Image (cartoon, rainbow, N blue to C red):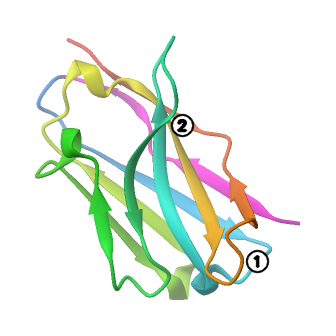
Amino acid sequence: QVQLVESGGGLVQPGGSLRLSCAASGFTFSWYHMRWYRQAPGKERELVAAITSASGSIKYADFVKGRFTISRENAKNTMYLQMNNLKPEDTAVYYCNAESRYNSARGYWGQGTQVTVSS
């Protein structure tokens, strides 16, 4: 059974930090490119960061550059998102996504974790 389980969300004050995790099971994690997306209320889901299967390439949305860091540990079947200097506009549900490097049509989504940045 394929699962992507996000954790680490919560309530944090502006300027604070959180570390999100995405634990994968039921598929060969190292064969998949991984991404973090987010969706704020009333807005479309947007790409936050992406990392290729062997961590050879990383990209970030402009609105998180210099504040967020994506990483993965293939040995642990886990992806991370370190979020620093959080802003109220970062408030959203954060989702992890897996896309097969062999077949872009094959992919999976997690259920999401809520991040709320508020004083």
- Magenta-colored span: 1-13
Q: Position of residue 73 (x, y in %)?
A: 45, 80
Q: Could you say which disc has been placed on residue 96 in the image?
A: none
Secondary structure beneath disc 2?
Answer: strand
Mark 1 → mark 2, Cα distance in angstroms: 21 Å
Most common SS among magenta residues: strand
Q: Nearer the viewer, residue 51 or 1?
A: 51
Location of residue 105 by image quarter: bottom right
Residue at 44% of width from left, 77% of height from top?
52
In the displayed structure image, the side of residue 91 where residue 103 appears, left or right: right
Q: Nearer the viewer, residue 47 or 87?
A: 47
Residue at 62% of width from left, 64% of height from top?
98
Q: Position of residue 43 (x, y in %)?
A: 48, 18
The amino acid pointed to by label 1 is Phe
Q: Nearer the viewer, residue 5 or 27?
A: 27
Question: Where does label 2 land, which residue?
Answer: 113
Contact flag, marks 1 and 2 (Cβ < 8 Å): no
The crowd level at tag 2 (other Cα within 10 Å; few <14, some 14-19, many 20+) is many
Image position of 63 with respect to 102: above or below: above
Residue at 63% of width from left, 79% of height from top?
29
Q: Which numbered disc flags the more N-terminal residue, 1 or 2?
A: 1
Question: Where does label 1 land, which residue?
Answer: 27
Secondary structure beneath disc 1?
Answer: loop
